[in-house]
Amino acid sequence: MNAMLDSDAALREIARIDALAAKAHTACGPAEKMVWRRWGAGPNLVLIHGGAGSWMHWIRNVEALASTHTVWAPDMPGFGESGLPDGNLDADTLYPHVLAGLLELMKGEAFDLVGFSFGGLVAALIAAERPARLRRLVLVSVAAMGLLSENPVLRPMRGVTDPAERKNIVRFNLNALMLYKADAVDELAIAVQGASAARERVKNRKLVLTDILLRLCREWQCPAFGIWSNQDLLYRNQIESLMAVSASLGLQDRFMIEEAGHWLQYEKSEEFNRILQELLEPDMGDVAAQAGDVRHG
């Protein structure tokens, strides 16, 4: 992806990738629908976006992954184009809608599941339900291990109507939390996050601040993998603790991507795509490193 895209070209790029997708809908409440996008052909690969996000968190990944897989990327309930169910919404109340939808769409076929950040916790909860045809679980920049301590200072957009000022706020927040290098905050990243964050209706998510992942991992029956980055604001001052705690998750392989922030699959998309495609190889379960080892991307 050309980092020099202007704002109009960024919007055209989003529209181009969106136009390549087929759309499907599943229920997320009595009168609400969850929107799914599908690209490619081959084994099923389900990508779950993060908080304040949408399917576009995978904007730099879906085409590469669709060269070998049928890629499914939903907008979770309360995000993007999907409806908002009733009730107190967090990962534990959202995941049943996502699980029911993906089982409906998979039609009994096997699938791999990848979750980013808050979506990683949703994916972990799904895996703990032990879906019969779940092949692999891949957690990307996931938290919920009782380690979060550094809170980014983000600027609110509520009440800001000037387009230029809204864009500046999105740029600031991307630099503050999502991306490590300033030049990674390009027009495409701003367009994606500006559109996605404006449509988020699931607020006050608290489960990610707990250590629930340490309990959920006991329920997984499929091979599980983890990918993190060494400049993620959530962890960059406690990488040793992250590696020690994540070693207890029983992961078959762990990867650390260098010089990337929280949104690592965007900032280091080629590296991420390569790692994920390697993990999705049919014999990966036989050749994965022993739990406790960490491979650097």
Image: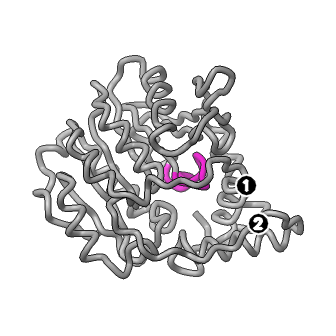
Which disc number belongs to residue 134?
Answer: none
Depicted 40 relative to depicted 284: above or below:
above
Indicate the quadrant where residue 29 lies: top right
Q: CA distance from mark 1 to mark 2?
A: 8 Å
Decide which of 279, 134 is in the foreground and name it. Answer: 134
Indicate the quadrant where residue 253 lies: bottom left
User: How many numbered marks does the figure carry?
Assistant: 2
Spot occupied by residue 260 in the image (x, y as percentages of width and height): 44, 73
Which disc number belongs to residue 198?
Answer: 1
Q: Is residue 58 magenta?
A: yes
Residue at the image position 16 percent from the left and 44 percent from the top = 285
Number of residues whose C-alpha sits closer than 10 Å to that of mark 2, classed few (under 14), some (14–19) or many (20 or more):
some
Depicted 291 relative to depicted 171: above or below:
above
Taking the image as shown, residue 283 lies to the left or right of residue 272, namely left
Does dot 2 land on a helix, a strand or a loop? loop
Is residue 260 in sight in this rendering?
no
Q: Which residue was labeled with disc 2?
A: 157
Which secondary structure is most common in the magenta stretch?
loop
Q: Quadrant of the N terminus?
A: bottom right
Is residue 31 in sight in this rendering?
yes
Q: Residue furthest front?
A: 88
Q: Is residue 54 magenta?
A: yes
Number of residues whose C-alpha sits closer than 10 Å to that of mark 1, classed few (under 14), some (14–19) or many (20 or more):
some
Residue at the image position 46 percent from the left and 28 percent from the top = 102
Q: Which residues are magenta?
A: 50-61
